[in-house]
Amino acid sequence: MFLARLLSRVKSSEILVNGPTRHAVQLPTVGASMLPTIQVMGDHVLISRAYRRGRGVKVGDVVSFASVIKPRERVIKRIIGMPGDFVLRDTPGKSHDQRMIQVPEGHCWVTGDNLEYSRDSRHYGPVPLALVYGKVLATVFPWKERRWIENGLQPAS
């Protein structure tokens, strides 16, 4: 069922899964910052490059982007703020200074799903949308643990 849905999405979106292409790339992951969504070692994710430079991404999407700290490295985080949104600058409950900041135009605010082990916008600030490489669609390896990466966040009303 998963493979059939993936293949239908591949055909309709022109996404290819055989390594790097113009449309998609498979990337191995390392680190605990996105637990439990993405495992510490060995998960390979499918990234759609149709979303490069932040085109079409929204709050809750998991994206890959060039690291602000080490530009040659790619990082995976979840978007929690888009241009104009107000976000909490620090980890909730970890600081007495609970300041809100507004995400500047042309940027997004990202965090890892595992806040305790994530180096993200709370440390280096907003990320330019121009650094977004693509949107993470699915975990594709190990095969027995393949799954879609869902957008579980809802905008505040």
Image (tube, rainbow, N blue to C red):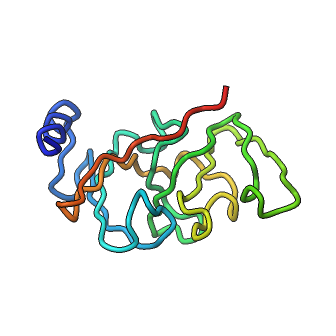
| Residue 93 relative to residue 62: left or right | right
Q: Is residue 119 above or below residue 21?
A: below
The spot of residue 65 in percent (x, y) is 47, 56
**Which sits in the foreground, 143 or 56?**
143
The residue at the point 62 percent across, 68 percent down is 116
| Residue 156 relative to residue 97: left or right | left
The residue at the point 60 percent across, 32 percent down is 155
| Residue 57 relative to residue 14: left or right | right
Residue lying at the far top of the rendered structure: 157
The residue at the point 60 percent across, 49 percent down is 128
The residue at the point 26 percent across, 58 percent down is 26
Residue lying at the far right of the rendered structure: 96
Residue 69 is drawn in which quadrant?
A: bottom right
The spot of residue 39 in percent (x, y) is 38, 66
Q: Is residue 52 above or below residue 56?
A: below
The spot of residue 111 in percent (x, y) is 59, 56
The spot of residue 134 in percent (x, y) is 40, 48
Q: Exactly how many numbered labels are in the figure? A: 0
Q: Is residue 31 above or below residue 44?
A: below
**Which sits in the foreground, 129 or 46?**
46
**Which sits in the foreground, 30 or 18?**
30
Quarter of the rendering occupied by the N terminus = top left
Quarter of the rendering occupied by the C terminus = top right
